[in-house]
Image (cartoon, grey):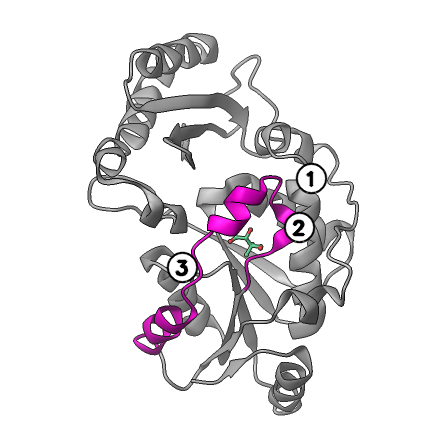
């Protein structure tokens, strides 16, 4: 499998593929690949001739330098994992920070019509400007027909849909269901950093979300949120950062239920110093 470290190399290969009228899917990642990523790659392969997987820990989307430094970097095992999916149709783009940012690793400022100020936007300063900057850059370099993103980062997926629409980027965005461990824990590259005692209790997050979903059938959003907060208030190891029930389209907190709208519950929890997020469709 070819691993391209520089944009000049990959763009000449992409140009040749485009000249042959082959379709290209793209799965942007920060590496430390797991089964959830492989599901995105497999879906992309069924819908495209070739798939570019980018592996790049993007510094501009981290507001916490320790999180950036500690983010797992496992290129060799990532490539080995991708080879189990296809040896011929996947191209890996693993650039350096300099190849992408050319000495100026700062974010562009975006206006995502307010989506960026909800939930993660409140807790991670500048995060979505960083995500918007790198995804736009990748789409300019690779020019894929389609981009694939997981619903675990549902707000990110919503913002990327807004990015391509608002900034006229000709890439179709596909969202893919959250891939979970057998115990319900949403797959995440951060899970590899969980100490055993935290890994053991982390499935509590999804278990609480599924019960919240049941309760949402008969109770108000406020009551469900209070119930979730209570579950975590007495938990020894997990610290709730937020639980929000929001409109799945605008991401604004739900004020009054309407049966014409789709709602989701969004959660962020600290397990020790590892921040885990998850979400669930409620109706
Ligand atoms: O979801 C991620 O891993 C990242 O935010 C992304 C989309 C690869 C951009 O760096």
- Quadrant for ligand 1 reads bottom right
Give the CA separation, mark 1 to mark 3: 23 Å
Total marks in image: 3
Look at the numbered discs 1 and 2 and tell me whether their residues touch, using CB distance below 8 Å: yes
Q: Which residue is tagged 2? A: 60
User: Can you give x and y, in whole percent of width and height, for residue 3 in the image?
Assistant: 50, 81
Badge 3 marks a residue whose secondary structure is loop
Quarter-wise, where is residue 22 in the image?
A: bottom right
First-in-chain label (3 vs 2): 3
First-in-chain label (1 vs 2): 2
| Residue at the spot 36% in from the left edge and 31% down from the top edge | 272
Badge 1 marks a residue whose secondary structure is loop
Compared with residue 221, is residue 130 higher up or lower down, i.e. above or below?
below
User: Can you give x and y, in whole percent of width and height, for residue 161 in the image?
Assistant: 64, 49
Q: Which residue is tagged 1? A: 126
Report the span colored magenta.
56-85
Q: Is residue 83 magenta?
A: yes
Look at the numbered discs 1 and 3 and tell me whether their residues touch, using CB distance below 8 Å: no
Horizontal relation, residue 101 to residue 250: left or right? right
Q: Which of the labelled discs sits on residue 172, or is there none?
A: none
Give the CA separation, mark 1 to mark 2: 8 Å
Within-10-Å neighbours for mark 1: few <14, some 14–19, many 20+:
many
Q: Which of the labelled discs sits on residue 32, or is there none?
A: 3
Work out whether residue 130 can be spotted.
Answer: yes
């Amino acid at each position: 499998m070819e691993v391209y470290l520089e944009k000049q190399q990959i763009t000449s290969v992409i140009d040749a593929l485009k000249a042959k009228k082959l379709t290209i899917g793209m799965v942007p990642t920060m590496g430390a690949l797991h089964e959830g990523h492989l599901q995105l790659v497999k879906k992309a392969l069924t819908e495209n001739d070739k798939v570019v997987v980018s592996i790049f820990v993007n510094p501009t989307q981290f507001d916490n330098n320790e999180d950036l430094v500690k983010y797992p970097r496992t290129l060799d095992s990532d490539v080995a994992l991708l080879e189990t999916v296809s040896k011929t149709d996947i191209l890996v783009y693993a650039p350096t920070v300099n190849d992408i940012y050319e000495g100026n690793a700062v974010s562009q400022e975006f206006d995502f019509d307010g989506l960026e100020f909800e939930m993660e936007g409140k807790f991670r300063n500048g995060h979505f400007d960083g995500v918007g900057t790198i995804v736009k850059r990748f789409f300019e370099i690779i020019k894929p027909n389609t981009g694939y993103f997981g619903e675990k980062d549902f707000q990110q997926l919503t913002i990327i849909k807004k990015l391509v629409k608002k900034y006229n980027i000709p890439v179709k965005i596909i969202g893919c269901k959250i891939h979970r461990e057998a115990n319900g824990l949403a797959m995440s590259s951060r899970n590899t950093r969980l100490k055993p005692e935290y890994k053991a209790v982390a499935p509590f997050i999804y278990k609480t979300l599924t019960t919240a979903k049941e309760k949402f059938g008969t109770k108000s959003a406020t009551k469900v949120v209070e119930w979730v907060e209570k579950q975590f208030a007495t938990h020894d190891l997990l610290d709730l950062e937020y639980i929000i029930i929001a409109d799945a389209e605008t991401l604004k907190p739900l004020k009054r239920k309407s049966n014409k709208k789709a709602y989701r519950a969004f959660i962020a929890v600290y397990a020790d110093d590892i921040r885990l997020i998850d979400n669930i469709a409620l109706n």
